[in-house]
Amino acid sequence: MAHVTLDPTSSVVIVIDLQPRFLASIHAADRVVARSSFLASVAAQLNVPVLATVQNRDRMGELLPVFEPILSSSAVDKMTFSAARSAAFMELLEDTGRRQVVIVGIETHICVCLTALDLVQKGYEVVVCPDATSSSTNDRHKLGMERIRDAGVVPAHSEAIAYEWMGAATHPKFKDILQLVKVANS
């Protein structure tokens, strides 16, 4: 398995398809939204770009409003299951100049997995947060995570990523991030 040490100056967070119509059928949807919004908020505090996709906006609706204020740009509407197969999304990602990608969202075994696999093939270092992803059933989530890990994608908890980005308790944003951690864990 690949080893990835995340650096906030090299990282991007991708929020995949967290749309209310999709979330209605997702196992542990509340956890996924809470952990995804936690990580996106930490990223925003640390100047890590937060990009997002929505699947078939006309039919499935907009991204959850909680993400709008922390996105680096508007959510990209895609019809592809892999965000990496959307030219508009890849242009946005490439414009960041960053090569480390942290993925949250749904569904683990489809859009999250396919995006992760395609980004690895394109030379990105990819991390997926199992606590901030899910599928319609827990077994589909677990199988998606197994496939992701087998492909060399690194799984990491959203809280671990927050601390990895800061590196030390002496980080200037440590107290702000610690407050986000406390709220997320309460």
Image (tube, rainbow, N blue to C red):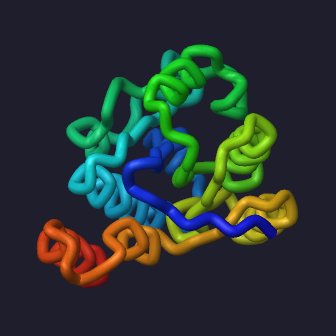
Question: In the image, residue 94 lies at what x, y percent?
Answer: 54, 26
Question: In the image, residue 53 lies at what x, y percent?
Answer: 51, 32
Can you say whether 92 is above or below 172 in the image? above
The residue drawn where x is 50% and y is 62% is 6
Q: Please tell me how many numbered marks the rendered image carries.
A: 0
The N terminus lies in which quarter of the figure? bottom right
The quarter holding residue 74 reads top left
- Seen in the image, is 72 located left or right of residue 20? left
The quarter holding residue 87 reads top right
The residue drawn where x is 56% and y is 49% is 100
- Seen in the image, is 182 located left or right of residue 71? left
Q: Is residue 136 visible?
A: yes
- Seen in the image, is 24 located left or right of residue 79? left
Can you say whether 152 is above or below 100 in the image? below
The C terminus lies in which quarter of the figure? bottom left
Can you say whether 31 is above or below 181 in the image? above
Q: Is residue 24 visible?
A: no
Say which of 162 and 28 sits in front: 162
The quarter holding residue 176 reads bottom left
Question: In the image, residue 65 lies at what x, y percent?
Answer: 28, 39
